[in-house]
Image (cartoon, rainbow, N blue to C red):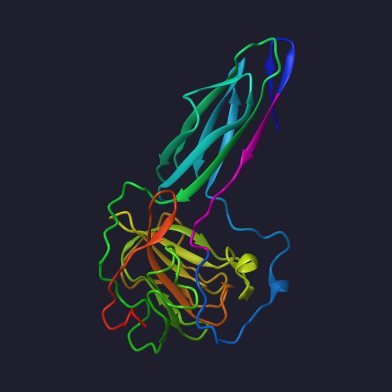
Amino acid sequence: MTMIRAGLLLTVLALALVALLAITRRAQPAGADSVASADPGAEAPGLQPQPIHELRNRNLGGGDEYLVRNLLAGPIEVRCALIKAENVASNPRLPRRLVVPARAEFKLTDLRSVEPTLPAIAEIECGAMVGDPNAPAPDGVSYAIPFYPGTKFTVDQGFAGAYSHHDPESRYSLDLGVPEGTPVIAARGGVVMQVEEDFRASGNDARRFGDRSNYVRVLHDDGSLALYAHLAPRTILFRPGDRIRTGNFLAKSGNTGFSTGPHLHFSVQKNAGFALRSIPFAMPGVDTSN
């Protein structure tokens, strides 16, 4: 709750943050006939996915300046709007869209009372999406198999898999069946943009487990984003901001989040219209149409 002084009146400015994580934290399960492994009690009390942005304000004397900060080691798109506004003006005017670079903070707007003798009330509502919508992120790029040579795996779901690879976010994804604890390696070089590693439970309830997968998101030089999901807890080697090369050990495979059995979910995505969209890729030696 933020208090703004306007003349002799105290003005309340309610600040509402709505974090839109596309993230692909909705990584997909393996096959429909896999054995479910749900243990909701394994999660720490109150454990939630990490935010990707934050909004803060500072008093200017007669108004407030609002700044939006990117918490990730890669670009995000932020869209903010002024809602329920009474006697408040924004400069620059809201709604406003910003692409915020890795770990940067940009000024969003100033809010001031139009008539200082009258009460002023407003809400700023913000949503954020990973990735730069202006990045080229071409499809058809070739990726290495994300396991060490000789690792045995199955393709439990390929592109447009009937069980869960049927929406734009996951259509071009692979579910690669491997035992829990299998080493997962980088399929392409880039920068580790985002890490989630504290979840332990799994299940086939998308509402309950859809945003509770452990994963590594890697930003490539062309702006595309690789997702390695359902990883085992606390096995991720690299930290956000680290640059990796093809073949580097990333983590161990697991069975966390929206998953019905141990596997690695791999996809390549981009920010397309403030929504994550999977894009086709090649992986020599793997039939992606399974």
Left/right of residue 183 with respect to residue 142 in the rendered view: right
Which of the pair 41/272 is nearer the observer? 272
Q: Is residue 218 above or below residue 130?
A: below
The answer to whether residue 17 is magenta is yes
Q: Which corner quadrant of the image does residue 138 belong to? A: bottom left
The answer to whether residue 156 is magenta is no
Looking at the rendered image, the quarter that the N terminus falls into is top right
Looking at the rendered image, the quarter that the C terminus falls into is bottom left
Q: Which corner quadrant of the image does residue 87 belong to? A: top right
Left/right of residue 228 with respect to residue 209 in the rendered view: left
Q: What stretch is highlighted in magenta?
A: 12-25
Residue drawn at point x = 38 percent, y = 52 percent? 272
Q: Which corner quadrant of the image does residue 154 belong to? A: bottom left
Label count reads 0
Image spot of residue 114 (x, y percent): 60, 14
Image spot of residue 60 (x, y percent): 58, 19
Image spot of residue 174 (x, y percent): 40, 76
